[in-house]
Amino acid sequence: MLNAASVKFLTYSIVGGGCALLNLALLWLLTSLLGLHYLVSTMIAFFALTPVGFWLQKLVTFRTPRAAAGFEWPRYFVTMALSFAANLSLMYLLVSLLGIWYLAASVVVTLLFLAGNFLVNSRWSFARR
């Protein structure tokens, strides 16, 4: 039987997995169909999907009051922006230097940051006051 923390992490992972699929679809659309550089596509996807991830994690995973969004959003954005900076660096390393396909690299990077992002979001971004 799973404890409450394990259920929360599993929920976070499922919600994040949905966001990751949206991210992959947007990366593919922007890079393969529209011809944008994969790092530009990664930046656009970040700004397009970060608000989606915030609301899904807030409402589904952490279930915090709507009134708390005013202080949660800046915290979440800072958390994700720091993760994003590392994401861009790793994407460059994996794709441009190691030759890994950009969509596969995105999956690897997402999985690498999953636990860390969960910990910061659960203990800071969405922490109950």
Image (cartoon, helix red, strand yellow):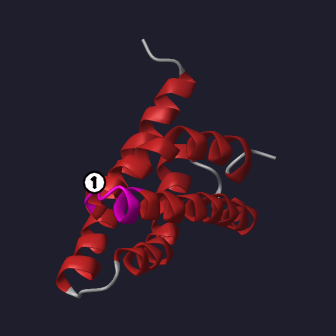
Q: Residue at x 34, y 51 (%)?
A: 107
17 vs 2, nearest the viewer: 17
Residue 96 is one of the magenta-drawn residues: yes
Report the side of 17 relative to 79 (left or right): left
Residue 114 at least partly seen: yes
How many numbered circles are shown? 1
Residue closest to the eye, 78 or 101: 101
Identify the residue shown where x is 43% and y is 33%.
10
Residue 94: x, y in percent?
39, 56
Residue in the image at 71% along x and 67% along y: 74
Q: Pointer 1: what residue?
A: 104
- Residue at image coords 72%, 61%: 75
What's the amino acid at mark 1?
Ala
Q: Position of residue 118 (x, y in %)?
A: 57, 42
Residue 46, relative to residue 65: is it above or below?
Answer: below
Q: Can residue 18 be seen in this view?
A: no
Q: In which quarter of the image is residue 67?
A: bottom right
Left or right position of 28 against 82? left
The percent position of residue 49, horizontal first and vertical second, equals 44, 70
Which residues are the magenta region? 94-101
Q: Quadrant of residue 96?
A: bottom left
